[in-house]
Image (cartoon, rainbow, N blue to C red):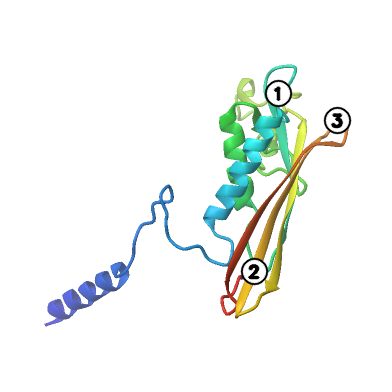
């Protein structure tokens, strides 16, 4: 009897977990959009920004080689609790794949993104470690460029129970040596829908 009950519970659990679930093909997603920010919005903003940087030559090093990019402050000025890394990571990947830029994880506003870079250097002089494999002094690369930005949201009521939600992905690429912005971009994403639909 216990075996039958266990089998029934397992069958119900498996059916409940799998019911109505569908894997989304992100390369061919024709589903309706939502009023809030979704993955397609981040992909669009990242792709347009990188294509603009490449087209203007902002990330082409006239001395040859790749620029070293540091990530600065990305501000979320929307009503949604989003991680701005959802945008930044896509930009980083595309820039890295372009062959024009590498990103430093040893420098950040709140300390290194990858703390192991500095932690590994604490092994210098430790007799338990082969010193020929410990990172030498003067090997870290200082950044040439800094990427900063903001994501804005503005909501507007429209007639006939409609609303318009406007998102703006604003980015600035700064030459750290001169402090001058060498590229700036803004990708607007405008959505219209029912005023009863929440955008957060």
Please identify the quarter of the rendering in which residue 120 is found.
top right
Q: Quadrant of the C terminus?
A: bottom right
Q: Which residue corresponds to the image point at 61% horizontal and 70% vertical from the top-left?
A: 199
Kindly give the residue lying farthest to the right in the view shown. Answer: 178
Checking the image for residue 75, the label placed there is: none
Q: x, y percentage for residue 173?
A: 76, 39
- List the residue tagged with mark 2: 164
Q: Depth check: give the residue in front, 129 or 47.
A: 47
Kindly give the residue lying farthest to the top in the view shown. Answer: 63
- List the residue tagged with mark 3: 177
The reply to whether residue 123 is in sight is no
Q: Which residue corresponds to the image point at 70% horizontal and 72% vertical from the top-left?
A: 156
Mark 1 → mark 3, Cα distance in angstroms: 25 Å
The mark closer to the camera, 2 or 1, is: 2
The mark closer to the camera, 3 or 2, is: 2
Residue 89 left/right relative to 9: right
Of labels 3 and 2, earlier in sequence is 2
Q: x, y percentage for residue 111?
A: 75, 46
Please identify the quarter of the rendering in which residue 138 is found.
top right
Residue 21 left/right relative to 159: left
């Amino acid at each position: 009897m216990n075996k039958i009950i266990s089998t029934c519970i397992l069958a119900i659990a498996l059916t409940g977990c799998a019911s109505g679930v569908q894997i989304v093909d992100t390369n061919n997603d024709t589903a309706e959009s939502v009023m809030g920010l979704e993955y397609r919005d981040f992909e669009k903003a990242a792709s347009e920004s990188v294509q603009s940087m490449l087209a203007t030559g902002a990330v082409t090093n006239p001395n040859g080689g790749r620029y070293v990019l540091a990530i600065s402050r990305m501000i979320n000025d929307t009503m949604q609790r989003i991680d701005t890394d959802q945008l930044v990571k896509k930009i980083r990947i595309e820039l890295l794949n372009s062959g024009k830029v590498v990103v430093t994880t040893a420098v950040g506003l709140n300390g290194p993104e990858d703390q192991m870079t500095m932690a590994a250097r604490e092994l210098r002089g430790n007799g338990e470690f082969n010193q020929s494999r410990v990172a030498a002094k003067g090997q870290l690369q200082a950044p040439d460029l800094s990427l900063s930005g903001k994501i804005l949201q503005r909501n507007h009521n429209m007639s006939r129970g409609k609303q318009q939600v406007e998102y703006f992905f604003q980015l600035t690429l700064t030459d750290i040596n001169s402090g001058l912005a060498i590229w700036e971009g803004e990708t607007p994403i405008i959505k219209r829908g029912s005023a009863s639909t929440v955008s957060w």
